[in-house]
Amino acid sequence: MNWITSFVRPKINSMLGRRDVPENLWIKCPESGEMVFHTDLEENLWVVPNSGYHMKISAKARLTYLFDDGQFEEIDRPKAVQDPLKFRDSKKYTDRLRDVRTKTGLDDSIIAGIGTIKGVRAVAVAHDFSFIGGSLGVSAGEAIIHAFEVATQQKIPLIMFAASGGARMQEGILSLMQLPRTTVAVEMLKEAGLPYIVVLTNPTTGGVSASYAMLGDIHIAEPGAEICFAGKRVIEQTIHEKLPEGFQTSEYLMEHGMVDMVVTRHELPDTLARLLKIMMKEPAMPPAAVEPPEEAAEEPVETAPVDEDETAPEPALEAADAVAGDGTENRDADNRG
């Protein structure tokens, strides 16, 4: 560093009152390269206005966007063993957990809450991809199973927002055991006759896509989400062939029958509420209390006075007179003769 960099430039900056600009002031769209002001992106639910690209969002933000007025009651998670295998790779698993908890403010990758969606009471469970890739460990599995139990006890539907890289390798076979355990919880909800809707977000892969994320009554996906078990690169290296364009995206899976519908983030609450009302056999709109209209008093009909000697002609006699005056009856008699 020379004297211009170390002395002159800081002096000029201090004189001009230059302020430091936050690094995340503008966010680049991964699909189109468009630069979007972060405030505009946040107001648009983290959907890029022009390209429609859906950015990753936190689990808490998903529940806030979903429930009425952003209000919900978070479900307590059961206690679970944090490091059952005493695992260590480049660093201790306990140290990795401590660092990611400090960074995200979360206990684990799952958040569950109870609230109303357009008046329909439901449980919602969401993965947070920022917590070790939304991976499924023992603690996350316990939280998911407990959410299914709460929904079954309260007889309300459950919505799952899947966003995960799969099972958490630091917990080994104990992580894989969460796949059949969560599958049993799904069957428990279905046996109670309650709806289970899965919203597949970007990305949903690995063991999560091989278990409860593909067992819903209805599968909804956000536009452009990557949904698969193994990644595209792994498959291409295995079969030594080039995969189709758009392979493993929401739109591709809907065309091939793996996803029921692709819904934008803005339309999700209305779509989910409509589906839940149909599945729960509830009216589309709550019946309004409408008072029956007051019956109007019948007014007496005025009739012209009739003399006692006069009698009203009968309809049959009037018809006979009309025929006779017309001469039709006589003509028919002559023709018959």
Image (spheres, grey):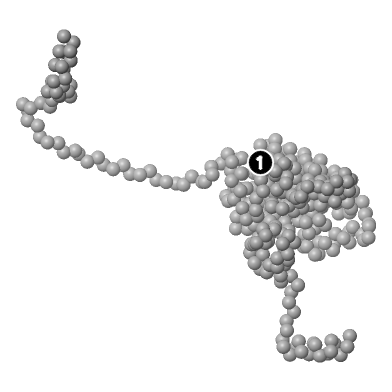
Q: Can the viewer see residue 326?
A: yes
Asked whether 186 or 337 is in front, the reply is 337
Residue 51 against residue 214 in the figure, above or below: below
Residue 330 against residue 72 in the figure, above or below: above
Q: Position of residue 175 (x, y in %)?
A: 85, 47
Q: Can the viewer see residue 112?
A: no
Secondary structure found at label 1: loop
Q: Amino acid at mark 1?
A: Pro
Q: Position of residue 171 (x, y in %)?
A: 88, 50
Left or right placement of residue 202 versus residue 50 in this view: right
Q: Residue at x 67, y 60 (%)?
A: 51
Asked whether 112 or 30 is in front, the reply is 30
Q: Residue at x 81, y 64 (%)?
A: 102
Answer few, some or many: residues within 10 Å of disc 1's Cα (few below 14, many 20 plus, some between 14 and 19): many
Residue 2 against residue 292 in the figure, above or below: below
Left or right placement of residue 210 versus residue 32 in this view: right
Instruction: Indicate the quadrant containing the C terminus: top left, top right, bottom left or bottom right.
Output: top left
Q: Residue at x 57, y 50 (%)?
A: 119
Residue at label 1? 195
Q: Position of residue 77 (x, y in %)?
A: 76, 52
